[in-house]
Image (spheres, rainbow, N blue to C red):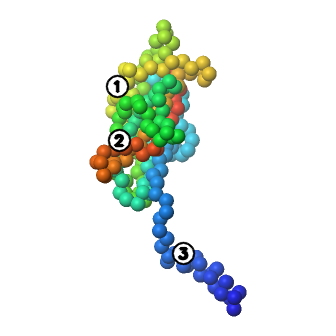
């Protein structure tokens, strides 16, 4: 009888698992960046002035409620602040562009992001001076941004960042959601 009872439970367990509803125990938001072929490879790296590049930015909501997000787009060189996962703080750099996003519970959102840069080389200072960035057809002023030559990598490294902020319904303000993703770029002459 014991063996028959155990076999009955083993056979019935897949059917029972479909009928039973377990409470959700994990609530989180996921964020991703995919390459131009909608895969986890082929990311642009060596950037040429005036050339268009593309990636896919995505968000998945598993918070248990409809969420209102704000994606802050930032750009930094090696000497500027990055978001800090350990201290749970965002970058202190100003946002170049904001993308408002509404995502239903258990829903996903994805946006193709195209970008290009306009910059010039200052031979006296051995640095690139950025003039503007086009992001999905919107021109963004970058006249205060410079990138110094890095001898270790033999290039001009820049980091295009996407920080995730979420609307706090209690305070009616956005707060850093402790998620960011970025792509390193080597600006070429």
In front of the other: 152 or 168: 168
Q: CA distance from mark 3 to mark 1?
A: 55 Å
Q: Which mark is residue 17?
A: 3
Q: Which residue is under mark 1?
A: 141
* Residue 46 vertical placement versus 2 (above, below): above
Q: Earlier in the sequence, mark 3 or mark 1?
A: 3
Q: Quadrant of residue 12?
A: bottom right
Q: Earlier in the sequence, mark 2 or mark 3?
A: 3
Relative to residue 33, is residue 72 drawn left or right?
Answer: left
In front of the other: 82 or 11: 82
Q: Residues within 10 Å of mark 1 (few under 14, many from 20)?
A: some
Mark 2 element type: strand
**Residue 25 appearing in the image:** yes
Mark 3 element type: helix
* Rendered location of residue 188, percent (x, y): 52, 22
**Residue 131 appearing in the image:** no
Q: Residue at x 55, y 44 (%)?
A: 40
Q: Residue at x 62, y 82 (%)?
A: 9
């Amino acid at each position: 009888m014991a063996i028959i009872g155990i076999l009955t439970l083993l056979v019935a367990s897949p059917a029972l698992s479909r009928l039973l509803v377990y409470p959700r125990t994990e609530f989180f938001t996921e964020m991703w960046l995919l390459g131009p072929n909608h895969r986890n490879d082929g990311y642009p790296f060596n950037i040429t002035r005036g050339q268009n590049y593309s990636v896919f930015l995505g968000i998945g909501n598993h918070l248990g409620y409809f969420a209102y997000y704000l994606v802050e787009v930032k750009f930094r060189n090696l000497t500027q602040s990055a978001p800090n996962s350990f201290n749970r703080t965002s970058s202190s750099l100003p946002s170049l562009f904001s993308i408002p996003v509404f995502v239903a519970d258990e829903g996903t959102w994805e946006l193709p992001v195209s970008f290009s840069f306009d910059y010039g080389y200052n031979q006296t200072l051995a640095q690139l001076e950025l003039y503007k960035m086009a992001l999905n057809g919107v021109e963004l002023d970058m006249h205060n941004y410079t990138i110094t030559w890095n001898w270790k990598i033999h290039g001009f490294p820049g980091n295009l960042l996407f920080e995730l902020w979420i609307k706090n319904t209690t305070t009616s303000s956005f707060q850093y959601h402790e998620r960011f993703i970025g792509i390193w770029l080597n600006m070429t002459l």
